[in-house]
Amino acid sequence: MSRWFTAFFVLLLSACTTLPPRVQQPASSALADTGGTPLGRIAAASLAEAAGGESGFRLLPSGEMAFDARLALAEAATRSIDAQYYHVHADTAGAAFLSALRDAALRGVRVRLLVDDYYAGDLYLVLRGLAAFPNVEVRLFNPLPERFGTPIRRMLLSLHEFSRVNRRMHNKLFVADNQVAVYGGRNLADEYFTRHGQANFIDLDVLSTGAVVRDLSASFDRYWNSEQVWALEQRLHALERAMKPAERRADFDVRLAEIAGPPPNVPPKDYLGQSTVRAQIAQGRLQLLPGSARVHDDPPDKVLQPPDPNKASPAMRAKLDVIAAAREEVVIVNPYFLPGPVGLRMMGEAQKRGTRVLIVTNSLGSTDEPLVYRAYSRYRADMLRLGVQVYEFGPELVRRSKTFGVFGKSTPRLHAKVAGVDRRWMVVGSVNLDLRSATLNTELGVTIDCAALTQQALGLLRADAFGSMYRLQLGEDGHTVEWHVRDDSGQTQVRREEPHASLWLDFVLWLQSLLVSEDAL
């Protein structure tokens, strides 16, 4: 058996490719003179109407509305669009987004699209066509040597460079005319916008105008011009580069038509009673809350630095500092929560100060990363003993309550990464509270000082929303964990066996744990 494995491994390595030398690309930066654009005038008028802050903010909790907001901003842009994403998928959402970028470019808008390369294997041919349109430039972050195929296949063929290609750009950012920005936890794929038939994410974005937009654009420029970014053109084969631009553009239109779907079905108002961004743009005013913000981004070359589990990178450090400053209450919403010894110590210190600590995360039934969930489960009893309140989303509970949207038969999964502190500060962005965000991936976070916005976000977890979650408590023995849930009559039911667990899943997770250590999560 060992000889067969060795032969397979040697064969795999022989198939591995290497990246050619990187070609330096011309630097560019966000356009500064966009105040006179339609979006610039709307942003200024909206901020003046909000009165009281250097920036304006609006929550985008509804997936359908968050998706339409990006499309509406792309349609309203007249000078520039800068988009930076970990994952743009070749599905109906990805097709609609890329179509909007093409249409903007045809109107003369400068489009810069920066995509992490890990999920780009099934998107290369589409991006090849998009990059052939005038005014469009596409770049890739930290490319894998193998260009095509599934992420797993590409990673297996990159094992000779594993320490590099295992480090990804997890940032998510969209900026129109350097005047309006959207950022948060959502990638560009159907499951982030309630368009998927099997599973959909519960997530949160923030739309902003004002000073914070310029800081976010500066973050985009740092990545766009970094040594870790490659021009898409350099990843094309010679025959592809020899294609005429018109042929590539026609191919783009054909490929998008094959994956395009119906336009999003956008409700007139979201869970907060807000009308759509599209409607507000048409009215010339965005309904914003005033405040200030600080942008925290990891340096692009984080992917080249040796990972240090004892040292958090800037985006993670900033989030932890805000959480550590809490004096009355901290609410942490995170899909992949691995506190580790440092997190447990911080929670213990908070409890000693009399600070209420509340954690909201996925249950085993709602997570898309069960191995991460298993690692998190080792900390549950310790957190409960410290007095931390722990809640887990239950997929059947979410579907029944409809507090976070209508999911039909699909599985609702928490994906939002938000921390609310003392009902005043909120941290939102791409940062998960796990070791991967701290040491491996690059991340983007924004700390917002706006009590009204923070309280709006926390309001999404109001009392009836907890009908969508299991409330965890310690059993009478002080060691075992119980899952408490309200039934339709309002009575509390207690489950002492972990919901959604099975012997088969335990076996699969055991096999995965043989290949992946907790330190890699």
Image (cartoon, helix red, strand yellow):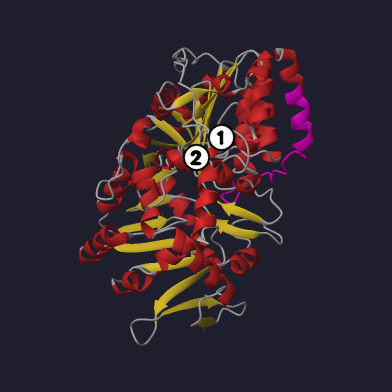
**Pointer 2 residue:** 158
Is 31 drawn above or below residue 195 in the view shown?
Answer: above
Mark seen at residue 392: none
Residue 43: percent from left, percent from top: 50, 25
Is 126 drawn above or below residue 367 in the view shown?
Answer: above
Q: Is residue 18 visible?
A: yes
Q: In the picture provided, is 150 more to the left or to the right than 364?
A: right
Residue contact at pointers 2 and 1, CB within 8 angstroms: yes
Q: Quadrant of residue 76?
A: top right
Disc 2: CA contacts within 10 A as few (<14), some (14-19) or many (>=20): many
At 41% from the left and 46% from the top, the residue drawn is 431
Q: In the picture provided, is 84 more to the left or to the right than 381?
A: right
At 41% from the left and 68% from the top, the residue drawn is 377
Residue 454: percent from left, percent from top: 41, 48
Residue 47: percent from left, percent from top: 46, 28
Q: Nearer the viewer, residue 86 or 264?
A: 86
Q: Amino acid at mark 1?
A: Glu
Q: Please, what is the dominant secondary structure of the magenta stretch?
A: loop
The secondary structure type at the circle numbered 2 is loop
In magenta, the rendered stretch is: 251-273
Badge count: 2
At 64% from the left and 27% from the top, the residue drawn is 127
Mark seen at residue 146: 1
> Marks 2 and 1, Cα distance to the nearest angstrom?
7 Å
Q: Nearer the viewer, residue 139 or 335?
A: 139
Q: Amino acid at mark 2?
A: Ser
At 68% from the left and 22% from the top, the residue drawn is 129
Q: Quadrant of residue 474?
A: bottom left
